[in-house]
Image (spheres, helix red, strand yellow):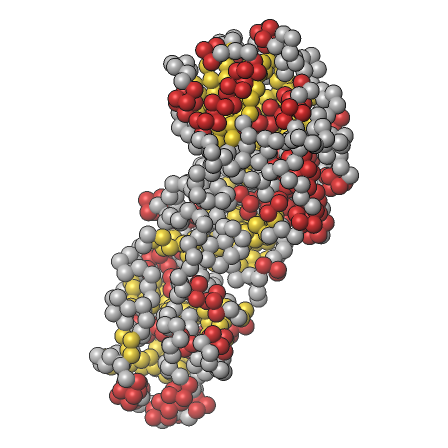
Amino acid sequence: MPGSIKDRVAIAGMGCTKFGERWDASAGDMLVDAAYQAFEDAGIEPKDIQAAWLGTTTGNTGMTLSEPLRLPYIPITRVENACATASDAFRNACYAVAAGIYDIVLAIGVDKFKDSGISGLGNGGVPGPSHAMMVESAPPRQFAQLATAYFARYGLSYEEGKEMIGRVSWKSHKNGALNRNAHFQREVSMETIINAPMISSPLGLYDCCGVSDGSAAAIVTTPEIAKSLRKGKEPPIFPKALQISMAPRDGNYNSKFDYTHVETTVRAAQAAYKEAGVTNPREQISMAEVHDCFSITEAVTMEDLGFSPRGKVREDIMSGRFDLDGAQPVQLDGGLKCFGHPIGASGLRMIYEMYLQLQGRADELLNPGKPSRQIKEPKLGLTHNLGGSPDGCAIFVGIVGLEGV
Amino acid sequence: MAGITSYGAYIPYYRLPRSVINAAWGRGGGRGEKAVAGFDEDSITMSVAAGMDCLKGTDPRTVDALFMATTTAPYKERQNSTIVATALDLGREARNTDFSNCLRAGTSALLSATDAVKAGSLKSVLVTAADMRLGGAAGEDEPAFGDGSAALLLGNEKVAVEIEGNYILSDDLADYWRSHEDTFVRHWEDRFGRETGYMRIPVEAAKGAMAKLNLTPKDFAKLCLYGPNTRAQAGLAGRMGFQPEQIQEPLLDTVGNTGVALPLMILVAALEEAKAGDRILLVSYGNGSDALVLKVTEEIEKIRDRRGIKRHLEMKRALDNYGRYLRWREMVSLAPPARPSAIPASMSAQWREHSSALPLYGVKCKKCGTPQLFMSGSSTRAHICVECFAKDEFEPYRFADKRGKVASFSHDYLAGGIDPPATATVVDFEGGGRGLFNMVDRAPEECEVGMDVEMTFRKLRYALGTHTYFWKCKPVRD
């Protein structure tokens, strides 16, 4: 019988750099920035770190972390699981503390993409057999197919579909505009979104998230140490569920994959709800940061997480349920779409936003002159990553909250 | 008697009106159009297309050899015919040969195949002829040269067209040529070529063949004659003693001069209309002339189910943009793409996958019967059944000849390569199985979930001297 992480470990401190096109910063610069924010927040010294898990899709070995931070001779594991990389680094760090092997550990993620000289992520890769080059593996194409099939299955006209996914991005831009650390901090009109240049139809420019640089970090420790470290400050935050699910990557050769939902998200979410004791996610999950690499991904994920009934997400999107002032806010910091997506850091960035909201500290990142971005008394926050493409992906679903919730 | 047991052809989907070429160069008019191979087609892919048409209803494993004729072989060293044969699923024992370097290579391959079948050393030989010669921009060859291919299957049983005899003349008359460093064909003064070459040598060959078999022009239903233009051809036919109505329409206004492929394409067009008992004179030209006397049998009625020339002529879309043509042919210097350079396929990985990937084999589970096309980033060889999880309990199952329906797609404008957008398509095959393929020969606006598609062998990319081939899909148009 699998155990549960619920309330067995705690987050004593977190940090997150500004995301975006960080022409000014190297991966090392950003790792130091995020880690030292977390050290300061937790009230610890670098020498207190007994072990670390580094999530990155671009750097090799734990030395990517030990070198810039000068963390001599401690165990560091480098984790890579595509867009679930940082969340998986965090998950492994939590397990090590829960197992009683370490007291205080660092989970940190980073990626530095904007030295590549190209927009997007490129094609990359080692030469393979001819069939592997058949279709460019660019992500917009992979997720656009989700939109085409979703629109066809639920009878949405092209215009209705574009409006639905456009509304997803409209909301994220609104949220990103409040956040001084977001990659994109500008509101965009529905008209601009819908009429933007096409990237991979039906996905236009504003249906696609940015490619960003950034780093985010968490100090994971025992509940006792966390409470003592945070005495007199906001309370520590507790993981309630940490689930990874791996698709068999058969969506492009198994006709059962319907291209209108992502079964791997469904499986990870069900496992997470069981682990956390959540029975009605639409009501019990206060807020979420989900993988919105593309607008359609967020829309479909709302159904896969059980936030919206199957085939009905359009109603929830259009009625504003997922807006910052809606019943179940999603992408409170702008999401991948606007806060940005340095792949190896994204999962910890999501947990960071949940952490700030749960502690009532969201306005620490408020852009001057903007209305508050703090939501009222959130209980449980959910984070979700989709690493790969709809037809085959590594999914993380995690839930965090205050102790005992 | 040895002869043709099946025929097939291929004409690319895109046709460039000659008026579009002329307009680009500030000239008026322009008669007809020419067939233009897509940006991802070449003589190898067009040979596969004609071969598939010809092998309809034939088990490719019963074919002993592939004789591939072209003057535009993608590889100078690497057997082009074996790439074609592998894609067509001929066995590894097939005696493949490249026939090249002369516009008579198509009829040379046909003659060699006939001899091999007649001698009994080969039972069944597939002959393909394909060309996509490039005419230099603004020159006379540019509107004249078209792209296309034909295929003939030779055998001893169920012969639809008997090959009664031939007369061959080889003559090193160089009215046009291309050296190892030429992209375009060079010409000597055209009156020399016309007066001492084209208007003379084929007449000798045709008369020689008729004399050999005691035949006169009246004995022939059709004359299938290679010709650079309709007027010269009519004059040549007259010199041979034929009447204008005996000349098989030479495709010059609809397809263009397809080089090595042209005589055989004209022959396929003639066979589509031919009746049992018809006699046909086939004459090619190029450093000499080959004349073949053919006679149609009743078996012709059993092989009508081909796309051949007629149906391919109907399946077309006008390329109304000369710039797009120049881009496809790399005739202009393009702005460097804002993407990393393409890399070729790994030769070792490709070889490992040859028996499965190139002929597009998947597998069928022997336990649960599920057909499946496994295409991971590193392999097409499945081990665990996608449905019942049985390990290595598979039999081969070919998808190249199956049609399918579109489950989803997108038009990608960033990863589009040389001819954006790239239409990535999830195909659910009839009978089961699914695969992800690029769709070609489609207008983006006609794509929809549920549309019918078929498989087509194409070039994925050219990089570092390496052509990488695989399958794509295209709409079913008949």
Where residue B197 sits, quadrant-wise, is bottom left
Residue at the image position 29 percent from the left and 88 percent from the top: B191
Q: Quadrant of the N terminus of chain A?
A: top right
Residue B143 sits in quarter? bottom left
Q: Residue at (51%, 51%) from the top-left corner?
A: B414
On the question of residue B118 being in view, the answer is no
Q: Position of residue B296 (x, y in %)?
A: 42, 79
Residue A314 pos. (x, y %): 73, 41
Of B37 and A205, nearer the camera is A205
- Left or right placement of residue B95 versus residue B426 in this view: left
Q: B379 and B417: which one is in front?
A: B417
**A250 above or below B425?**
above
- In the rendered picture of this protein, how many numbered marks are placed on residues? 0
Question: Does residue B101 lie above or below A376 as drawn?
Answer: below
Q: Residue at x 34, y 81 (%)?
A: B283
Residue occupying the point 66% across, 33% down = A178
Location of the C terminus of chain A by quadrant is: top right
Q: Is residue B329 above or below residue B375?
A: below
Q: Furthest-left residue in view?
A: B172
